[in-house]
Image (cartoon, rainbow, N blue to C red):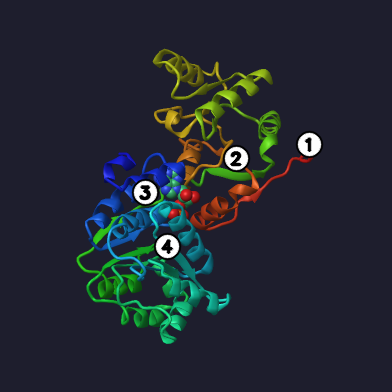
Amino acid sequence: MSFDSFNLHPHILANVYALGYKTPTPIQSQSIPPVLLGKDVMGLAQTGTGKTAAFTLPIIQRLITGPRSGVRALIVAPTRELAQQIHDTFVKLCYGTRLRSMALYGGVNIKSQIKKLESGVEIVVACPGRLLDHVKQKTINLSKIDVLVLDEADQMLDMGFLPSIRRILTHLPKKRQTLLFSATMAYAIDELAYEVLHEPVMIKIGHSAPATSVKQALFPVASHLKSRLLIKILRKTNIESVLVFTRTKHGAKQVAGKLEQAGFRATSLQGNLSQNKRQSAMNGFRNGTIQILVATDIASRGIDVSAISHVINYDMPDTVEAYIHRIGRTGRADKMGEAFTLITHEDNIEVRNIERVLGNRLEQCKLEDFDYAA
Ligand code: AMP
């Protein structure tokens, strides 16, 4: 499936590709069609699955026609950080559409928020408390809302926001589209869903839990030192066969070249290879003549080698789902495996998303005899 198949407005599609999204994630391919049809959706999915774009894209498509200057989409989220993140996604995906989004949360001056609301916005991403402040002061009009999203509903309930949500609902039109996202399906969520959703489409995206037989570690490093650090790690580690992931085909080729220069039996597997070359790389990896295979996510599909001792993310994957999928390549068949991820400071948000889904912090490692300041 590709983003082209959703019939999104050309501006929106251009923004999707500008963000570097190539194919929809599972939650996107399952949510976008029903949301475009105006249906209510109950989505069970965690951060990191691409769920933000799963609702922002069809909402923008819906708002791109129709009146401006009134608030038509309201997204309610538990934390400032999440509200800001969703707003940022709207800004990027709305580029060129003249739709305006704003984030509303406490801890910042309310006057500047009022001014912005007065100037006219179509999309508001809000935390419950500050939203109700505006409702009380009559500085926001929620009577024209077409779409309501309750994001991370389970967290909102955990934080005691249910009464606030109920109060917000009384200010919204009864006839509207409602989307509810939650990472877990607790009884209370069920009740809330019953209250707010009308004949919802249920979508469940499971995180395939990472195997407990995989030991994971992060290696913080400056971007320009990645290949040097990779070589150092490989020299210090008892490796059998290693699968290294890069973001791009070009990156795969380059990294494999550097590893070969450094004396490793390495090669790359990427889409530009002929079927023959691809096959011979795979065979070499399987029979041990090739020890290190450098691949992109797409090229790595179909690698069915059961004895991979190490997965190394040279580049951080885009989604938690992809991370879990990658590291699941090792630690198979009752063997212990190790998964290392090189991270730069740009990867911090993604690291937090992964740690949230895993439910624990990942160990950060530093090699003593490596010059991190080079
Ligand atoms: P979310 O679960 O919405 O927080 O998204 C997690 C990360 O995945 C964000 O960094 C998004 O920019 C990224 N992302 C969302 N959709 C896609 C996609 N279709 N392809 C690649 N990355 C994506």
**Residue bearing mark 4:** 100
The residue identified by callout 3 is: 12
Residue 372 x %, y %? 76, 40
Q: Residue at x 33, y 45 (%)?
A: 10
In the foreground, 297 or 172: 172
Residue type at tag 4:
Arg
Q: Dot 1: few (<14), some (14–19), or many (≥20) neighbours within 10 Å?
A: few
Horizontal and vertical percent position of residue 231? 68, 29
Q: Is residue 252 left or right of residue 92?
A: right
Q: Earlier in the sequence, mark 3 or mark 2?
A: 3
Q: CA distance from mark 3 to mark 2?
A: 36 Å
Residue at far bottom of view: 136
Extreme residue in the left direction = 199
Residue 48 visible, this angle = no
**Under tag 1, what secondary structure?**
loop
Q: Residues within 10 Å of mark 2 (few under 14, many from 20)?
A: many
Residue 69 percent across, percent down from the top left: 37, 69
Q: Which is more toward the observer, 335 or 67?
A: 67
Mark 3 crowdedness (10 Å alpha carbons): few <14, some 14-19, many ≥20 = many
Instruction: Tell me the CA gap for discs 4 and 2.
Output: 41 Å
Q: Amino acid at mark 3?
A: Ile
Q: Earlier in the sequence, mark 3 or mark 1?
A: 3
Task: Tell me if 150 is positioned left or right of 224 in this view.
Answer: left
State whether residue 335 appears in this view. yes
Question: Between tags 3 and 1, which lies in front?
Answer: 3
- Check disc 2 and report the residue beneath it: 340
Q: Indicate yes or no: mark 2 CB to ligand 1 under 8 Å.
A: no
**Residue 8 rendering spot, x and y as whole percentages:** 30, 47
Mark 4 and mark 2 residues within 8 Å of each other at the beta carbon? no
Mark in front: 4 vs 2: 4
Q: Earlier in the sequence, mark 1 or mark 2?
A: 2
Q: CA distance from mark 1 to mark 2?
A: 22 Å
